[in-house]
Amino acid sequence: MFTKDELKWIRKELSDYDPFEIAPSYYHREKTLNNREKNKYAVRIELERLREKIREYSPDELINLKSKKAQNEKGINTFAGIYIIYNKTGNRYYIGKGEDIIKRASRHFTKSGNPELYEDYDLHKNEFLINLIPLDKTSFSTLNELEGSAIVAYDSMYPNGYNRVIGNILDRPIYDRDALYEVSDLILSRIEKSEEFKTLTNDKKRMQFIRAIFKKYNLPENAGFQINFLKAIKIHQKEKKKKSR
């Protein structure tokens, strides 16, 4: 799978690891949170302008559009984006994301989404309004970036809103130097076509596979790299799945 020179280089790069050093992901998280707070007013203005131009749904309308058949009959196509659920009565927001935005948003009104939101909806005393925002109509490049920024912009974290987590920040590999990105790309390019790679359907299997590679090729223990390489595998699998559709 690897040449002698490649293994020598991989071992050299992976050996430069200090388990007591602050992980680069920590700095990435802090920087991301600071940027979201700094830009929250601009994001709110951008999303409000989009909300003014698009249709607003009631929970019942959204539930009735959940099936593909209903969408086809109405000439509506679902898309990737975020949904903004607004409890107008209680003045509380919930922000979520999805590749199939209609299906994802409607589940909150069928007892399979946010429990607290559903509880308020089930009382029949609160008026809920929902906006579906397409990712490609915004200035953001990923759903995670859009969702996380919107959560801050609408102050939708509990107790002011219904969100319990700030969004997925550490959703990609964060290495502390360029050489480790190159190591990651090299290993991934050699394993992606193997039969075993196709069986990696969850994080437990992915990590077991990674550890097996490290053992087989006598690679230095590097927990930080392994965790980030697991993310690299997930992203690669997701992108490959999209292209095959």
Image: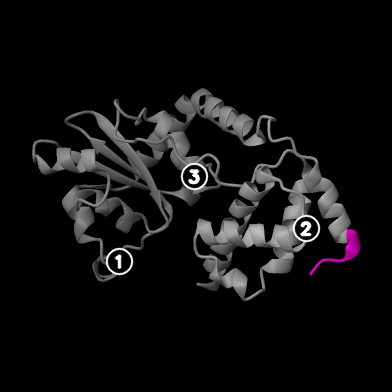
Looking at the image, tell me whether mark 2 or mark 1 is earlier in sequence order.
Answer: 1
Looking at the image, tell me whether mark 3 or mark 1 is earlier in sequence order.
Answer: 1
Local crowd at mark 3 within 10 Å, few (<14), some, or many (≥20)? many
The way the protein has been coloured in the rendering is: one colour
- What is the three-letter code of the residue carrying label 2? Asn
Q: Residue at x 64, y 58 (%)?
A: 210
Q: Residue at x 45, y 39 (%)?
A: 167
**Residue 108 seen by the camera:** yes
Magenta residues: mostly which secondary structure? loop
Query: Where does residue 33 sit, x and y in percent of width and height?
Result: 52, 29
The mark lying in front, picked from 2 and 3, is: 2
Horizontal side, residue 24 vs residue 33: left or right: right
Query: Label for residue 186?
Result: none
Q: Residue at x 25, y 48 (%)?
A: 108
Q: Is residue 92 above or below residue 179?
A: above
Looking at the image, tell me whether mark 2 or mark 3 is earlier in sequence order.
Answer: 3
Query: Where does residue 148 sit, x and y in percent of width and height?
Result: 46, 37
Q: CA distance from mark 3 to mark 1?
A: 28 Å
* Residue with the mark numbered 1: 75
Query: Where does residue 235 sit, x and y in percent of width and height?
Result: 58, 56
* Residue with the mark numbered 2: 218
Local crowd at mark 2 within 10 Å, few (<14), some, or many (≥20)? few
Q: Is residue 147 above or below residue 32?
A: below
Q: CA distance from mark 2 to mark 1?
A: 57 Å
Q: Residue at x 25, y 61 (%)?
A: 66
Local crowd at mark 1 within 10 Å, few (<14), some, or many (≥20)? few
**Label 2: element kind:** loop
Extent of the magenta region: 1-5
Whether the magenta-drawn stretch holds residue 4 is answered as: yes
* Residue with the mark numbered 3: 144
Horizontal side, residue 69 vs residue 89: left or right: right
